[in-house]
Amino acid sequence: MHRTVLTDGLATVGRTVWRLPRLLLVGMVRFYQLAISPLFPPSCRYTPTCSQYAVQSLKEYGAIKGTILATWRVLRCNPWGGHGHDPPRWFGEPKPERETEPHEHAHE
């Protein structure tokens, strides 16, 4: 029984250590969102905003891939880049079906 408790405890510590870089990076982006971003006018050309995209990328893909995706997004967010809806997805991943199907315009 002690071995199970010890094993469970080590597994919990391992998961926490594994998640720590992601949690720290998300915390840094949240700090930016709360303390720095309000000082400047909105300028992101995409939805979600670049900082929201960064948080979503970090949560979904982890620290390394999330940072790569967030950096790539910030580099694309410029006057010569694109605009519009751009949810996080890893390079080469297909768009979710709801983004590839034509939208019906219902007026209710």
Image: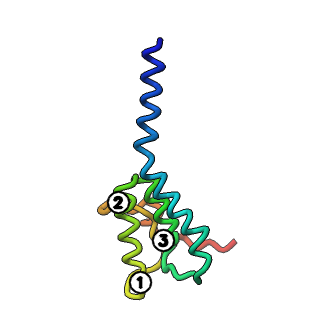
- The residue to which callout 1 is attached is 78
Q: Amino acid at mark 3?
A: Cys
Q: Nearer the viewer, residue 80 or 96?
A: 80
The reply, left or right, for residue 2 in relation to residue 93 is right
Position above or below: 46 against 6: below
**Residue at the extreme right of the image, as rendered:** 108
Secondary structure of the residue carrying tag 1 is loop
Query: How far apart are the alpha carbons under marks 3 and 2?
Result: 15 Å
Q: Which of the numbered marks, if any, corresponds to residue 50?
A: 3
Residue 77 pos. (x, y %): 42, 79
Q: Which of the numbered marks, if any, corresponds to residue 60?
A: none
How many neighbours does mark 1 have within 10 angstroms: few (below 14), some (14-19), or many (20 or more)? few
Secondary structure of the residue carrying tag 2 is loop
- The residue to which callout 2 is attached is 90
Residue 98 pos. (x, y %): 48, 62
How many neighbours does mark 2 have within 10 angstroms: few (below 14), some (14-19), or many (20 or more)? some
Please report the residue visible at 57 percent of the width from the left and 81 percent of the height from the top: 42
Q: Amino acid at mark 1?
A: Asn
Q: Quadrant of residue 57?
A: bottom left
Image marks 3 and 2: residues in contact by CB distance under 8 Å = no
Query: How far apart are the alpha carbons under marks 1 and 2?
Result: 20 Å
Q: Amino acid at mark 2?
A: Trp
How many neighbours does mark 3 have within 10 angstroms: few (below 14), some (14-19), or many (20 or more)? many
Q: Give the mark, 1 or 3, whose residue is nearer the N terminus.
A: 3
Q: Give the mark, 3 or 2, whose residue is nearer the N terminus.
A: 3
